[in-house]
Image: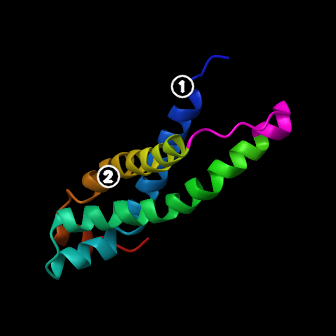
């Protein structure tokens, strides 16, 4: 059985587009927070952490459900070592944090005054 990269790319794209939507949705609040003294780095970290907090329960629930789905389809219950399970959860969390920090970085580049002067759509 060969492992395709398509599910991983799809997951990374989904995380990026979700983060981009969150950045666009929070641009006025982020600009206000920056106007009150937060640095762009603090805003980026907050946006990336918000995405990570929503991804972490998905990983924790998704790993056991993935094993159950595999057992249901293949008829074989295979559980990898605890080290692999921990590495999967931590690795997925790190990838989500890295992938979501890119849109957050792009979203905080605009000047605060420009964002606050925009009409609320």
Mark sitting on residue 101: 2
Is residue 23 a member of the stretch shown in magenta? no
Mark sitting on residue 69: none
Report which residue position mark 1 lands on: 5
Colour logic? rainbow
Q: Residue at x 49, y 54 (%)?
A: 18
Quarter occupied by residue 23 = bottom left
Question: Which quadrant is home to the C terminus?
Answer: bottom left
Dot 1 falls on a residue whose secondary structure is loop
Q: x, y percentage for residue 45?
A: 28, 63
Front-lying residue, 90 or 30: 90
Above or below residue 27? Residue 110 is: above
**Left or right: where 106 falls relative to 55:** left
Quarter occupied by residue 116 = bottom left
Question: Which quadrant is home to the N terminus?
Answer: top right
Q: Residue at x 47, y 40 (%)?
A: 12
Q: Residue at x 40, y 44 (%)?
A: 95
Above or below residue 76? Residue 90 is: below
Q: x, y percentage for residue 38?
A: 17, 75
Specify start and end residues of the magenta stretch as a single range: 70-81
Q: Is residue 117 visible?
A: no
Q: x, y percentage for residue 100?
A: 38, 51
């Amino acid at each position: 059985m060969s492992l395709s990269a398509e599910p991983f790319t799809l997951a990374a794209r989904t995380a990026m587009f979700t983060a981009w939507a969150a950045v666009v949705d929070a641009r006025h609040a982020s600009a206000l927070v920056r106007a009150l003294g937060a640095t762009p780095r603090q805003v980026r970290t907050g946006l990336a952490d918000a995405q990570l907090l929503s991804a972490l329960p998905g990983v924790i629930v998704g790993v056991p459900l993935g094993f159950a789905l595999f057992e249901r389809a293949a008829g074989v219950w295979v559980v990898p070592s605890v080290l692999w399970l921990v590495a999967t959860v931590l690795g997925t969390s790190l990838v989500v944090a890295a992938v979501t920090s890119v849109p957050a970085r792009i979203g905080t580049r605009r000047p605060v005054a420009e964002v606050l002067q925009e009409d609320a759509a």
